[in-house]
Image (spheres, rainbow, N blue to C red):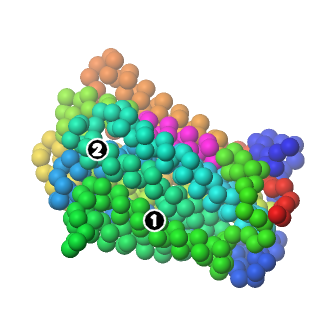
């Protein structure tokens, strides 16, 4: 017996199909402690306002988190040197590939929470949150910590880290793996709150954690008074301590109530394997998707490294795509999260047409934002590159090419991500996986491979391949969402078995 079924073409839809402006209203939801109420404007009020309410805090949180990474690099580069910067870059790349897969279970959590919030089922919401917490702790203590600690040297050898870089990266990576529980709990909490309609609390918590992280890094990287300088390892220590402190507070709040999600009372403390299986059922495709895209990115970097002007191309790519284009993806990711939560809640409330309308609105907002940023990319590329001290003529020439291609590409990736959110939020997490493998791995890498096999691969060829991949992802994501099969995906849990 399974507690969750996800049928793309079942004979009976999971919900009725009122119009986007249906007057049907789900019952107000409160906990048994009566301390929380869900934001019903998400399933009843103006959709554009609901999208902005969830997207803006997430965008701001993404930007703050990105700025923290820049501060880390500046400090380590100043007090440790280039090997420290390279070590952080390599270690984070490895850690993120692993953590994206492990944390994918929280994508499944988001599917369940948004659907149950839409149905007004607060008891089910709280059960899912607690089981997601147990899963996070279990994966951290029994998978990430032991395996990560012992596998770290081999992982660094796999990415060909130079001896000096490996010496700095190894303690950093081991600290991040061993003390990963704080980060996982934060990811779990932020995802749960956003899926339940509260994006402001994760933003506040994220800002507090970032400030703590920066302060701790200042002390631990360079040393202060009796506290010695830990160098690169200090950056990992600061991240781990900050996330642990914030997560400890979050657990206290989840236990005592007051947030829109909390831990259930009188449910016992044992794992509920039916819920945990559901978390993985909906979440694992997202994790595999993240790994596939990271692998595709690494292979694309290998093509860039094979160019005649590899050094200039790598510098241009590192700033233009990894830094400047992040403003487009940060914005689109915020809208993706908003689309997922709103679509999931409205589908749970029996309003699939309203769920669809919300995704369309989020996509239009994403296009407007990407177009605005694209104007800067197209008309001011040299000035933007100059901010990062990239002034060499060859780097500026290649970077200008890339930024102008990205000014168009951003329009498509913004739409693709919002429709991906709509699919994932309603429970269709497999389609985005297949779409990403085709569009972000197979298509661009095939273009580069063919051009390199029959002629000379130039930087512009790679930039065009990236654009074609984004266009492909956009077309496939929109087409899949418009098929409407997400309307038939069922989500439910077995009755509570109080311990």
Q: Which residue is mark 2?
A: 317
Residue 15 against residue 217 in the figure, above or below? above
- The quadrant of the image that shows the C terminus is bottom right
Q: Quadrant of residue 135?
A: bottom right
Would residue 189 be found to the left or right of residue 414 on screen?
right
At horizontal 83% and vertical 53% (from top left) the residue drawn is: 14
Q: Quadrant of residue 154?
A: top left
Magenta span includes 289: yes
At horizontal 18% and vertical 49% (from top left) the residue drawn is: 82
The secondary structure type at the circle numbered 2 is helix
Mark 1: give few (<14), some (14-19) or many (20+) Cα within 10 Å. many
Residue 392 against residue 180 in the figure, above or below? above
Q: Which residue is mark 1?
A: 243
- The quadrant of the image that shows the N terminus is top right
Would residue 356 be found to the left or right of residue 498 on screen?
left
* Magenta residues (range): 283-297
The secondary structure type at the circle numbered 1 is helix
Residue 356 against residue 441 in the figure, above or below? below
Marks 2 and 1 sit apart, C-alpha to C-alpha, by 31 Å
At horizontal 43% and vertical 38% (from top left) the residue drawn is: 151
Task: Single out the residue that lies furthest toward the front.
Answer: 226
Q: Nearer the viewer, residue 463 or 341?
A: 341
């Amino acid at each position: 017996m399974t507690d969750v079924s996800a049928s793309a073409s079942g004979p009976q839809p999971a919900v009725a199909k009122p119009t986007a402006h249906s007057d049907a209203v789900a019952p107000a939801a409160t906990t048994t402690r009566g301390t929380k109420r869900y934001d019903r404007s998400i399933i009843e009020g103006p959709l554009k306002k609901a999208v902005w309410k969830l997207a803006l805090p997430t965008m701001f949180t993404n930007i703050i988190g990105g700025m923290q990474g820049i501060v880390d690099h500046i400090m380590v580069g100043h007090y440790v040197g280039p090997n420290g910067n390279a070590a952080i870059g390599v270690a984070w790349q490895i850690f993120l590939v692993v953590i994206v897969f492990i944390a994918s279970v929280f994508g499944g959590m988001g599917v369940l929470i948004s659907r149950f919030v839409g149905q007004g089922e607060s008891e089910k919401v709280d059960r899912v949150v607690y089981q997601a917490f147990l899963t996070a702790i279990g994966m951290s203590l029994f998978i990430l910590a032991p395996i990560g600690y012992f596998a770290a040297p081999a992982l660094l050898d796999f990415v060909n880290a130079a001896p000096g870089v490996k010496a700095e990266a190894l303690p950093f990576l081991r600290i991040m793996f061993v003390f990963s529980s704080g980060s996982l709990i934060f990811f779990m909490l932020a995802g749960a709150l956003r899926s339940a309609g509260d994006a402001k609390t994760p933003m506040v918590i994220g800002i507090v954690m970032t400030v703590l992280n920066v302060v701790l890094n200042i002390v631990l990287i360079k040393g202060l008074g009796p506290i010695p300088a830990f160098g690169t390892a200090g950056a990992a220590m600061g991240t781990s301590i900050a996330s642990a402190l914030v997560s400890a507070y979050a657990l206290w709040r989840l236990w005592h109530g007051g947030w829109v999600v909390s831990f259930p009372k009188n449910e016992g403390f044992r794992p509920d394997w039916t819920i945990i299986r559901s978390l993985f059922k909906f979440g694992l495709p997202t994790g595999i998707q993240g790994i596939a895209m990271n692998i595709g990115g690494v292979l694309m970097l290998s093509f860039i490294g094979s160019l005649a002007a590899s050094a200039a191309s790598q510098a241009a790519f590192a700033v233009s795509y990894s830094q400047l284009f992040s403003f487009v993806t940060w914005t689109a990711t915020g809208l993706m999260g908003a689309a997922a939560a709103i679509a999931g809640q409205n589908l749970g409330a029996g309003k699939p047409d309203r769920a669809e309308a919300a995704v369309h609105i989020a996509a239009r907002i994403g296009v407007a934002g990407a177009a605005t940023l694209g104007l800067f990319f197209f008309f001011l590329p040299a000035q933007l590159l100059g901010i990062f001290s990239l002034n060499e003529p060859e780097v500026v020439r290649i970077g200008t090419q890339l930024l102008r291609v990205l000014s168009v590409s951003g329009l498509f990736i913004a739409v693709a991500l919002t429709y991906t959110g709509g699919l994932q939020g309603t429970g269709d997490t497999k389609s985005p996986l297949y779409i990403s493998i085709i569009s972000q791995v197979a298509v661009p890498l095939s273009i580069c491979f063919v051009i390199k096999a029959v002629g000379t691969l130039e930087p512009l060829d790679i930039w065009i391949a990236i654009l074609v991949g984004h266009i492909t992802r956009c077309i496939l994501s929109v087409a899949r969402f418009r098929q409407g099969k997400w309307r038939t995906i069922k989500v439910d849990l077995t009755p509570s078995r109080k311990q």
